[in-house]
Image (spheres, rainbow, N blue to C red):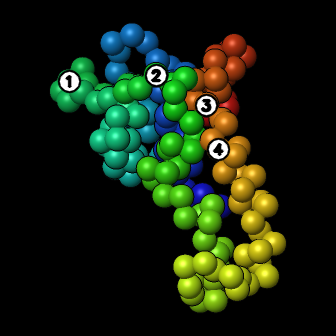
Amino acid sequence: MISNTAKYALRSVLYLAVKEQKDKKIGIKKISKDLSIPAPFLAKILQNLSKHKILSSTKGPHGGFGMGKDPMTISFLDIVEIIDGLDMFTECVFGLKVCEQGEDKKELCPVHTNSRPVRESLHSLFKEQIVGEIAVTIRSRGRDIYI
């Protein structure tokens, strides 16, 4: 239900939260290689997250990316909202006209109505998943395979 861009963003933020070291940045080439994400595409994603202060970036030979905010204050929903917006949690999965008409949306397609509990559940899950908590769990297991 979320875009590949949002998946890459979530993985990247988790990666940086797990690897976080005080005042140390990780270069785009290393992140790209470790996560198997094309560097130019990843760079755009990380720049967008930096613009929204989720990440911080430093230019230059010792530059790279790090956490811009405390990972314990960042939910998965925060990241998805920056990348994809929140429409997926409310809009018709098929984009049918009947679901778009009228502000009160009294008449919805059957799929829209039937998918509402799933969309609401996913919204709650993303809101409850905190990057810092997930990073702590990954570090405690001593393996990076989860990212």
Q: Position of residue 131 (x, y in %)?
A: 58, 30
Residue bearing the label numbered 2: 70
Q: Residue at x 77, y 68 (%)?
A: 115
Q: Secondary structure at mark 4?
A: helix
Q: Are marks 2 and 1 in contact (CB under 8 Å)?
A: no
Q: Residue at x 66, y 74 (%)?
A: 93
Give the residue type that dot 3 points to: Ile
Q: Are marks 3 and 1 in contact (CB under 8 Å)?
A: no
Q: Residues within 10 Å of mark 2 (few under 14, many from 20)?
A: few
Q: Earlier in the sequence, mark 4 or mark 2?
A: 2
Q: Are marks 2 and 3 in contact (CB under 8 Å)?
A: no
Q: Residues within 10 Å of mark 4 (few under 14, many from 20)?
A: some
Q: Earlier in the sequence, mark 1 or mark 4?
A: 1
Query: Where residue 61 is drawn, which disc sits there?
Result: 1
Residue bearing the label numbered 4: 126
CA distance separating discs 2 and 1: 25 Å
Frontmost of labels 3 and 1 is 3
Q: Nearer the viewer, residue 55 or 4?
A: 55
Question: Image height check: is 102 above or below 72?
Answer: below
Q: Position of residue 125 (x, y in %)?
A: 71, 44
Give the residue type that dot 2 points to: Asp
Frontmost of labels 1 and 4 is 4
Residue bearing the label numbered 3: 130
CA distance separating discs 4 and 2: 17 Å
Q: Position of residue 126 (x, y in %)?
A: 64, 44
